[in-house]
Image: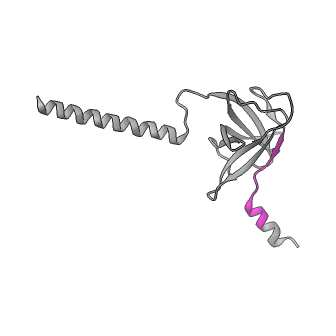
Amino acid sequence: MKKLSTEFIVGLFLLSGIAAIGYLSVVISGVSAFGNDGYRIMAKFENSSGLKKGAVIEIAGVKVGQVSSIHLDRETQESEVWFAVDYGVDIQEDAVASIRTAGIIGDKFIKISTGGSDELLVDGDEIIETEPSISIEELVSKYMFDQ
């Protein structure tokens, strides 16, 4: 009887460890197991180099969403970025979306600078004013070879 209870306790401990690792994997990866909890907004950028699906959306340094898809608009030859913004976060129609670099590693994120308009964006709307990603390589080559 004692052997059975020891094996049972070890089994429970093992299962709880596997569940904890699974939970941490989901939380760290940023994957939502229960769908998207927010409304979708789109912005077109001249250059979205380095931006990836799942990148953070920030307003005033606070995470308010994440990038859900990035693809090329074949008509305008611009990068079309769709992102989900948390419900309860209001974005004015004259807001500006810019691609920024986080820290020394170089991870890209979208910073939204709020506007002053009374009109708010709703699901499916587009942020018109955007600032593209700054390419360090282009800056260096511009100053090295431009005379």
In front here: 139 or 101?
101
Quadrant including the N terminus: top left
Q: How is the image coloured?
A: one colour
Relative to 47, say whether 36 is above or below: above
Q: Magenta part of the protein: which range?
A: 128-140
In the figure, 119 relative to 51: above or below?
above
Give yes or no for residue 70 being in the magenta stretch: no
Q: In the picture provided, is 1 more to the left or to the right than 20?
A: left
**Horizontal and vertical percent for residue 48?**
73, 48
Residue 32 x %, y %: 55, 32
Q: Nearest the camera: 71 or 40? A: 40
Instruction: Identify the residue at image location x=73%, y=39%.
Output: 81
Q: How many marks?
A: 0
Q: Quadrant of residue 115?
A: top right
- The C terminus lies in quadrant: bottom right
Coordinates of residue 127 in the picture (x, y in percent) = 81, 36
Residue 113, image x, y percentages = 78, 42
Say which residue appears at 79% left-offset and 41% top-offset: 44
Q: Is residue 133 magenta?
A: yes
Which residue is drawn at the image coordinates 86% and 35% (left, top)?
Answer: 116
Q: Is residue 66 visible?
A: no
Q: Where is residue 7, by image quadrant?
A: top left
Q: Residue at x 64, y 42 (%)?
A: 53
Kindly tell me whether residue 123 is visible in this rendering. Answer: yes
Q: Residue furthest left?
A: 1
In the figure, is residue 87 to the left or right of 46?
left
124 vs 54, left or right, is: right
